[in-house]
Amino acid sequence: MHARHITTQAPLFQSGPVPDAVPCAARGAGRPEAGRELTLALRRHDGPAVREWLQREPTAVGWRDELGNTPLHTAIQSRCEPALINTLLAHRADPAIANGDGNTCMHLALGLRPTMPAVVESLLDHGRWFGGGIGLGALGKANRHGRTALELGREAGGAPAPGHAAILPALEAALLEWMNGFRASVLAAIDADDGPAVRHLLTTGGWSLDMPLADELDVLQLALRVKAPRVACTLIDLAAAVDNRAVLEQPETRLGMTPLMTAVALEAGAPFARLLLHGVPVDVHGLLGVTALHLAAASGQLHAVQQLVAYGANPDARDDAGTTPMMLAASAGQLDIVKSLRQAGGNINGRDRQGRTPLMYAHLGDQPPGFIFKIVMAGARTDMVDGEGRTVRDYQLDSNIRRVAKGQNICTIL
């Protein structure tokens, strides 16, 4: 293999369209019967028939069967000779398309046993992996079984399979270099909140949106954390367009925060609205059982609370301690949120695991008498007793003592 095969890299931040980066499936796969006939000809290793069908219906090269395989997938699985594979590549077959198992053509080529190094060489020589260069990032992308193409090129013990001893170490080193440079470019675009640049890098670089980019965070979570709303909205739309629900919905590993929860916690209004628009689940429980509605209520985000409820969030969602969003709102003195949650069906006299009610939480938050009066007028009962037998009056007295200690004036109303 020539050195250029492993060092060529897709230009970062290139301008203008990349024609070869458009998957065949996106260009149209022609008549289904043409794709089926082309696939059958490949299974028979019938070169003249393959060329005839490609000449008659060039877009048949992008046809996909019920398992998501393109004719190029079939050619590799059928161990076609490199000449036939090169014919498909010359007709713009895209080796980067993944089938239903998440396998690109390079997964299949490196996984062949006995190996066919010439097939791997053909795919690399073609230089069409996600546009300019060979798109090395695809080599590190796992299939649905968690295996990358490079891993499939090795035997169970980790040694390169016969025929791959020379190519695998070079590819792995090139992949590492490519990933470092790619990450740096994406991070720079996120810092600049440049949505189009990030979209271009990801779509031409073969980076799966749900792959960790930095600090164990995928690119959407990272954009939210560094407060790059334009990038975040671009990524949300991109993930929805390719039906990557994982990046839209999955919690990050450290705090169990979904993108929706992160958007609420950081008060990222535009990404928050975009996530709701794309139908992400609203009642996912994160660390300690907290939901997005808990976060919005505790931080006084009335509009976010109203939006979450409108999209089906449970107003009485409970965290691991049995705390509801209304309890947190009461503790924080957010009367409008308390009323909004009650109008949505929330229980103003609900109890947590210790038997405490929203009114008790208001006292725990040392809210002033005016707020206490209003929450009582909204329906909070004053005769409730918690799990330890403590009454609302007990909570009020404790609050008064704390407020006196802080030098505040008090007046009791109960």
Image: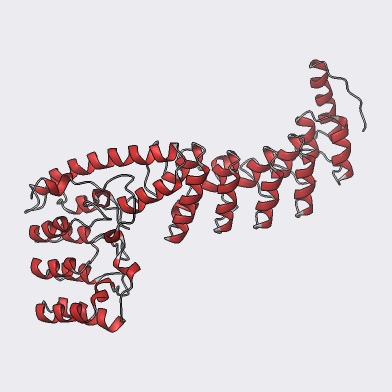
The type of colouring in the image is: secondary structure
Total marks placed = 0
At 8% from the left and 57% from the top, the residue drawn is 117
Q: Nearer the viewer, residue 80 or 200?
A: 200
Where 32 falls versus 327 (above or below)? below
> Seen from this angle, which residue lies furthest front?
16
- One can see residue 209 in this view: no
Is 328 displayed left or right of 22 in the figure?
right
Answer with the quarter of the image where residue 66 lies: bottom left
Residue at 69% from the left image edge and 44% from the top image edge: 325
Quadrant of the image containing the C terminus? top right
Taking 21 as reference, is 274 left or right?
right
- Measured as percent of width and height from the top left, residue 275 is found at 55, 53
Q: Quadrant of residue 388?
A: top right
Q: Is residue 53 visible?
A: yes
Query: In terms of depth relative to the viewer, which is nearer, 75 or 15?
Result: 15
Residue drawn at point x = 76 percent, y = 55 percent: 345
Where does residue 317 sit, x and y in percent of width and height? 66, 49
Q: Is residue 25 above or below residue 374?
A: below
Q: Where is residue 318? Give x, y as percent.
A: 65, 46
In this rendering, position of residue 377 left or right of residue 149: right
Percent position of residue 300, x then y: 70, 39
